[in-house]
Image: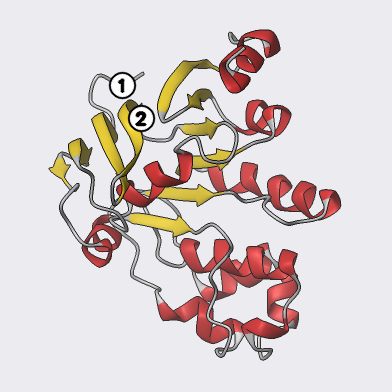
Amino acid sequence: MSLNPLLNVTGLKAGYGAAQVLFGVDLSVAEGEVITLLGRNGMGRSTTIKCLFGLLEPKAGEITFADKRTEALPSHQIAQLGLGLVPEGRQIFPNLTVEENLVATARANAANGLKHWSLERVYKFFPRLQERRLNMGSQLSGGEQQMLAIGRALMSNPDILLCDELSLGLAPIVIREIYQAMPVITAEGMTVVIVEQDVTMARQVSQRLYCFQEGRVSLQGTSSELSREQISQAYFGV
């Protein structure tokens, strides 16, 4: 781990109204690293992502991205700093075409040394999106919408890609196809944070895991050093 992580979270507490969801979450991500936030629904993983992207203001704690405090910034400013989001449930624009969706949030490549994600490159990466570029977002299948959500986030040329529940509501064959694309994204050094429930998938795609249990990190470590039994105990809390 880098002594100066690209993203660092300390003592993060958050919730919705009177309901507290996060109880002092600490995590860090080094440049070029892929980490997975692993756990069951309702354990605080997606709430953490919302805080990172400025969709939910924390009640306490600090979030530092590229040496800038971001916990009080709105989401559009955080996006401009270099965070890209593949949101839970895709949330593509249903009344825009595929191509309009892709260019809606595109930005010039930041000075991060990563290869630029252009419309041409996204179409080469996901050929089905090119085939359906004139279709409305509402006319796509769930898998195609997920590809579109990933492509849209890549078009923002982020320093860190946040992926919230990539496999949610998708058929197993589509999930495999989506995850087969991830090594191409990460091979160049893209920093990625993934929210996932599937232990096997999480261990395959990430260097480190953070297991969430009741709004706290119950276990963390490298994918290679943590056993399935340790992860299962941290996952289920038994």
Q: How is the image coloured?
A: secondary structure
Local SS, label 1: loop
Q: Is residue 113 left or right of residue 164?
A: left
Q: Is residue 139 left or right of residue 8?
A: right
Disc 2 crowd rating (10 Å Cα; few below 14, some 14-19, many 20+) is some
Q: Are marks 2 and 1 in contact (CB under 8 Å)?
A: yes
Q: Mark 2 and mark 1: span between their CA atoms? A: 6 Å
Q: Residue at x 40, y 45 (%)?
A: 47
Of labels 2 and 1, earlier in sequence is 1
Q: Position of residue 98 (x, y in %)?
A: 61, 82
Q: Nearer the viewer, residue 88 or 23?
A: 23
Q: In this figure, which residue is indicated by the disc labeled 1?
A: 2
Q: Nearer the viewer, residue 88 or 117?
A: 88
Is residue 166 depicted above or below 130 in this figure?
Answer: above
Q: Nearer the viewer, residue 187 or 195?
A: 195
The amino acid at mark 1 is: Ser
Q: Is residue 109 visible?
A: yes
Q: Is residue 189 visible?
A: no
Q: Position of residue 183 (x, y in %)?
A: 63, 41
**Residue 85, numbered circle:** none
Asked where in the image residue 80 lies, by quadrant, the reply is: bottom left
Local SS, label 2: loop
Q: Residue at x 68, y 28 (%)?
A: 199
**Residue 30, numbered circle:** 2
The amino acid at mark 2 is: Ala
Disc 1 crowd rating (10 Å Cα; few below 14, some 14-19, many 20+) is few
Asked where in the image residue 131 lies, by quadrant, the reply is: bottom right
Q: Residue furthest right?
A: 173
